Amino acid sequence: MPQVQGRRLRTQGSQEPLIYLNPASFINMHRAPTGNDHAEQSTLWVEGTDTSGANINVAFINCGKINGQDQWVQMVLAGGAGTFTTLVSTGQFNLDTTAVGANTLGNLTGATGLIISVGTGNFSVNGAPTSTITLGIGLTTGTILIGDTAQSGAITIGNSTAAQTVNIALGSTASKTVVIASGTAGNTVLVNGGVNTSANITSINNGAAAADSTVNILSGVATAGVQTLNLANGNFAKTVNIATGTLGSTVNILTGINSVAQVFNLATGASAAASTVNIMSGAATAGTQTLNLATGAFAHSINVGTGAAVVNTIAVGGTGANVITVGNTQTAGSISLGAAMTTGTINIGSNLSGLVTMPAVVVTAAGTTVVNNVRVGQAIYTGNVDASGATTVYTLTNSLISATSSLFLTVSNLGANDAQLTITRILPGAGTCAISLKNNGAAALNGNVQISFFVN
């Protein structure tokens, strides 16, 4: 039987001869104990009601003294609530609940904080297969941080080997700002960068937009370094579609006002197989298709098929009723066609049955001298009455003619009389040409003389 020593009971122990039991009495008060409330170790202090008579159901146990102060540790009575300053375990412990319902740790009142510290054993929040785990469900202006500013390890979201859906800022009724890797120390951002064993789909701004949408890539104003945008550069066949929609798109490439030289390359690689560049090659069914090439009001150098020591096939105009003009509005300069050819063939309307025109510049003057400074032209002389059998010298003043020029001339004369002018001599000189015409007709000239010329 237990033996009584003073107010405490003792009984037979397994390691010691006698061990003390709890005190035979307890303290019942309407307040919580303090360090200055002295009692024997293991004494119970029960605060059933507070000073106002409200039900408290809180108990404390005396755990001894430290520096003369009694250490009262709160206990929770069945069905009651309790307050803990420290919950300590020297080993593994489980905090379980078997009831179905919501378990609350902490509250939303005032400056309440909750800190969970974890060593190298890691921290896990596990859920049932169909459960939902939510962070910050009540936040409106607060901040959720995952990883500190000094974090150097890996933060992984959605690491399962099973199919997953990872949603970020998915709410549909309010605007969001989602910032990824905006630091200044050089970032590497990988999206869909794994070696996929089935089809990958990466969509950006791919919704059926009902308002303006803008996607900016490398659009900042760089102050240093080299900016490089690689698009489908891997060594494998690709199909790259840009603005293939049907409702009218505007695609701008290098349209900025550059202050230094810029280069735009299109299919410029050293091809080892066939290459084709198609521009407006579709069969249009409506509208007007216009291809503008170097139409800006500035000097351009336009090279087409200028590769050295290669044979180019350059076709302009198909089988339709095309209207092709070359230099049709210029008033100065030059147009060369095969100027350096020493062999080969230049065909101009070879299948047109003679329907080739070479417009001439016409100058008319009275007398026997006309000034016309063009290579292809016509000089019309008026007011002359060359007699039958007479020879008259007509002068063509032309700055393009030299003493060694080769000229092609024809002459015709108008009027009702039988005047038949025939060229008997062409004498070129420096800026001039003397053309001798003899009237082989039976009557004197009574109309204009027309000399058509080509200066080579």
Image (spheres, rainbow, N blue to C red):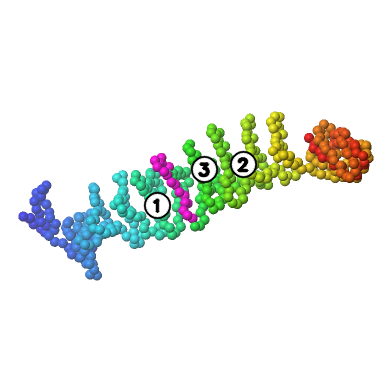
Q: Which residue is mark 2?
A: 261
On screen, residue 151 above or below 425:
below
**Amino acid type of the residue that numbered disc 1 sits on in the rendered structure:** Asn
Residue at left 49%, top 57%?
210
Quadrant containing the N terminus in the rendered view: bottom left
The crowd level at tag 1 (other Cα within 10 Å; few <14, some 14-19, many 20+) is few
Return the residue at label 1: 167
User: Please, what is the three-letter code of the amino acid marked with disc 3?
Assistant: Leu
Give me the residue at 41% from left, 43% from top: 199
Write the start and end of the magenta stretch as one range. 193-209
Q: Secondary structure at mark 3?
A: loop
Q: Nearer the viewer, residue 263 or 95?
A: 263
The image shows residue 309, relative to residue 277, as above or below, that is above
Residue, far left: 1
- Give the quarter of the image for residue 451: top right
Q: Which is more foreground, mark 2 or mark 1?
A: 1
The amino acid type found where label 2 is placed reads Ala
Q: Earlier in the sequence, mark 2 or mark 3?
A: 3
> Quick check: is 347 in the magenta stretch?
no
Point out residue 36 in the picture as x, y percentages from the top left corner.
23, 60
Image x and y of residue 437, in percent: 89, 37
- Label annotation for residue 229: 3
Q: Earlier in the sequence, mark 2 or mark 1?
A: 1
